[in-house]
Amino acid sequence: MGKNSVISKFEELPKQADDFVEYLYNRYVKPGSKQPSDKPISESPFVGMWKDRKGMADSTEGVRQQCKEQWKRRKLDYGQ
């Protein structure tokens, strides 16, 4: 199906189809949106941004401690 064929069929559709296409365009194509980078995520500027932070030497342990604190607070707040 060629471009002209699609356009002629589109013109026959009700107004809701036009609204839907506009919605899809705004959601997925939006002018000025950045295209995905070909760089691996490991080269992103945010990778390693906390490398010098003392409390983050062991990130797994750090997350574990935060979970413990949140659960303690929840028990206090809800009387569990």
Image (spheres, rainbow, N blue to C red):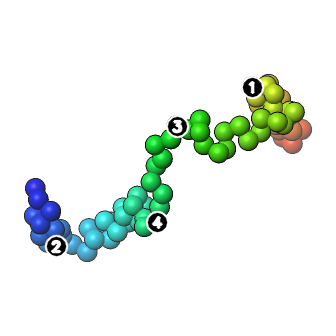
What's the CA distance linking mark 1 and mark 2?
Answer: 56 Å
Which circle marks residue 11 in the picture? 2
Q: Quadrant of residue 42?
A: top right
The amino acid pointed to by label 1 is: Thr
Residue at disc 2, secondary structure? helix
Image quadrant where one finds the C terminus: top right
**Between discs 1 and 4, the one toward the N terminus:** 4
Badge 1 or badge 3: first in the primary sequence: 3
Give, as a three-letter code, the residue at label 3: Pro
Q: Which mark is residue 32?
A: 4
Inter-mark Cα distance, 1 to 4: 38 Å
Is there CB contact under 8 Å for labels 3 and 2? no
Identified by mark 4, the residue type is Gly
Residue 40, which numbered label? 3
Question: Taking 40 as reference, is 6 left or right?
Answer: left
- Observer-side mark, 1 or 2, equals 1
